[in-house]
Amino acid sequence: MSSDSFKHTYPLDPWCIRETAFDTASHFLDETLFALGNGYIGLRGTHEEGYSGPKGTSLDGTYLNGFYESESIHYPENAYGLARTNQFMLNVPNAKGIALWLEDERFDPLQGTLDSYERVLDFRTGLLRRTLEWTSPQGRKISISSRRLVSFTEKHLFAIEYDVTPLNFSGAITLVSTINGAVKNLEAGDDPRVGSAISGRSLVLADIEQAPHFSALAQRTVNSGFMLVTAAQTDVRGVAEVALARNGEYLEQSYRIAAIQNETVRLTKYGCYFTSRDYPESELMARAKATLAIASSSGFRALAAEQERYLADFWRHADVEIAGDDALQQGMHFNQYHLLQSVGRDGKTNISAKGVTGEGYEGHYFWDTEIYIFPFFLYSKPEIARKLLEYRYAGLPLARERARQMAHAKGALYPWRTIAGVECSAYYPAGTAQYHINADIAYSIKLYIEATNDEEYLLNCGAEIVMETARIWMGLGHYDRQGRYCINEVTGPDEYTALVNNNYYTNAMAKMHLEFAASIAERLQREWPEHFQRIAKAVMLEAGESEQWRHAAAHMHLPYDAALQIHPQDDSFLDKKAWDFASTPKENYPLLLHYHPLVIYRHQVCKQADVVLALLLLSDQFSLDDKRRDFDYYEAVTTHDSSLSSCIFSIIASEVGYHDKAYAYFMETARLDLDNTHGNTHYGVHTAAMAGTWMGVAYGFAGMRVVDGDLRFAPVLPKQWTHYQFNVHLRDCLLQVRVEQGCTTYRLLQGAALAFSHQGQRVALTVNSPVKECQ
Ligand code: BGC
């Protein structure tokens, strides 16, 4: 089925998405959009009763962030140092199954008549609600009303409340609670963005427990050797008969009820997942039982109330209000909500390119986290941002190992894509060669320290990461004959250009990184000499290293073309043949699916923002004229085939005064998944673009920049909007920014005082005294 056919139009509600028809044509896509998650468990929006629609219109996926199988990567033509092991997020047992029988007829929305149907994903309650009325082929009428949640406060738990009411009959209703452990992952085929290369099963049965209200499966992954326990507790009142059945790894518990017309039968199901990535194997089953027992005794309503409280706090910090464009408002909230559902917050997991909504990119974590997603959490929920950085600290030993494999005697090189820290990219030109990942991580640590003053993180994790990763530039680069510090044979963010010398973004970010590392070393020596000694000893830092970092940074080669007055993407980019856009048919996009990489690499054509991204991240190093010229040049050669591109172009367009373009690029980002504009949302949401929507408002329209800890705004109001409003967490303050026609109001919601600048003028804000700046 062509992915273009997966489209769905929802009513424009700011706080939910709602579907009012059961549509097999959009079903695959809806499974992603209506997915629930809590940063650990991800349940695609498949229905409890299963799905009997056409092949290729469903992926019944359940995922656990960071729970993976590994496999060896086999290269028919081998080379030293290539990534050896892939890790991919597993599709784990589906424990949410509930089959429903009315006497001998099985409920199936695609049989009989669906008299009414509505499904709502509510961003404020965190519930997926479904109500429907159905008439069976033999004329039995029922209503079903169900609510599902994946707990934000209990990482391992999800729950479903399922009500059935017979509307025109009294008789036997049988509810069957199932766990389906015979699951496997989707196979990727030719599209690298879809799934994994593995085929067949990855989980092997270790144990089964079944009792009238409890069932559990223990399974072990074949290669990674992890144990997984999937368990469920099912509570039903007024049951006449319970029967247990099992078919391989498919478990069933049937509850037969003598139902009475117009009286509701309720089943409540609690499900949980525990793995040996978190706890010793011997504890998993007991932990599952205890979690389910607590959930069942508190009941669904209590869990739902807790969920709502958690979300109220989230929105109090994170809400971005957009008045005047309902479609964008919905897109914004949808994206923010899905980011919260996707982000790992245990310090052991991170946020994958598709969150926990699908198998695209195999559940891998990329630079997407640090450069796209991190700012949203940092300035909304800094405690979550810290967890993302803790994850990187946990990966430092493996990053050191990788550096040695790559012939760097010192330092640490983070993997381009990974789950548990090993390099998983089997295509090094667009993988390992993206050394900028090291600088991206250092950049996010810099933002974090400046925004939070979290000295504990700096001293115990951050300083070590920043210094170890900075050392790689010294092993990688060299001074050329003119004394310029050059970095050769790397790939920048733009994946349509590979293995180049002096990629502008990489060099500029490496310079920032080296300076930051040197300043940390100096600060530690000054303020915390004992910590400096400890880290220096641990990483065997030699005398003079930080001076070398400063020297390389000062002499970093930052390409500039005097004739065009732009920053070339790299040494060779401007001399390449132009891509013939005029003769490229629309259906040949994205180019990566229609041209060999070499064909693409030979041309001046970009998949995504590269120099333009540097203009944002290192904002104060460029004049406005520089920014405009770079934007103009690169806009003409960029396809935006990557979903990471439009948001950055929107932000810079705003800054240089191209307001219509800024708006158009922003539109593309804000509803990228809701409108499935990249045609692949059915394989999972695009978390980087989702966070790019937040950046589009804060960095774009509001012109927010944080330069060396100093906060600045230069707000504009898009003419389509009447106002917009968002919050920024900085140090102990929560600042509310409200932009209206002609005026911006700054208000402290938390904290005593905050100084920042508005359109270049200093503002000293204190609690209870909002400041209104008008032109
Ligand atoms: C982009 C990368 C990104 C990856 C995962 C690719 O298409 O080119 O920059 O990290 O997707 O989102």
Image: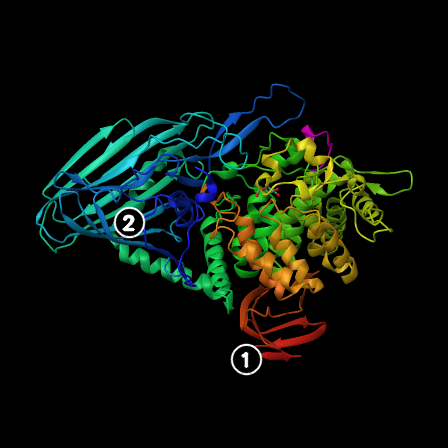
Front-most of 181 and 715? 715
**Residue placed under numbered mark 2 in the picture:** 160
Q: Is residue 540 magenta?
A: no
Which amino acid type corresponds to the residue marked 1 in the rendered image?
Asn
Q: Residue at the spot x=29%, y=44% of the render? A: 48
Quarter of the image with the C terminus in it: bottom right
Q: Residue at the spot x=66%, y=72% of the render? A: 755
Gap between marks 2 and 1, in whole Å?
44 Å
Q: Is residue 166 left or right of residue 401?
A: left
Q: Secondary structure at mark 1?
A: loop
**Residue placed under numbered mark 1 in the picture:** 768
- Which residues are the magenta region? 404-411
Q: Earlier in the sequence, mark 2 or mark 1?
A: 2
Front-most of 238 and 548? 238
Q: Position of residue 649 (x, y in %)?
A: 65, 55
Which amino acid type corresponds to the residue marked 2 in the rendered image?
Ile
Task: Answer with the quarter of the image where residue 395 lies.
Answer: top right
Q: Is residue 280 left or right of residue 208?
A: right
Q: Is residue 500 above or below residue 76?
A: below
Quarter of the image with the N terminus in it: top left
Ligand 1 occupies quarter: top right
Say which of marks 2 and 1 sits in front.
2
How packed mark 1 is, by other alpha carbons closer than 10 Å (few <14, some 14-19, many 20 or more), is few
Q: Main secondary structure of the magenta part?
A: loop
Front-most of 645 and 719? 719
Q: Secondary structure at mark 2?
A: strand
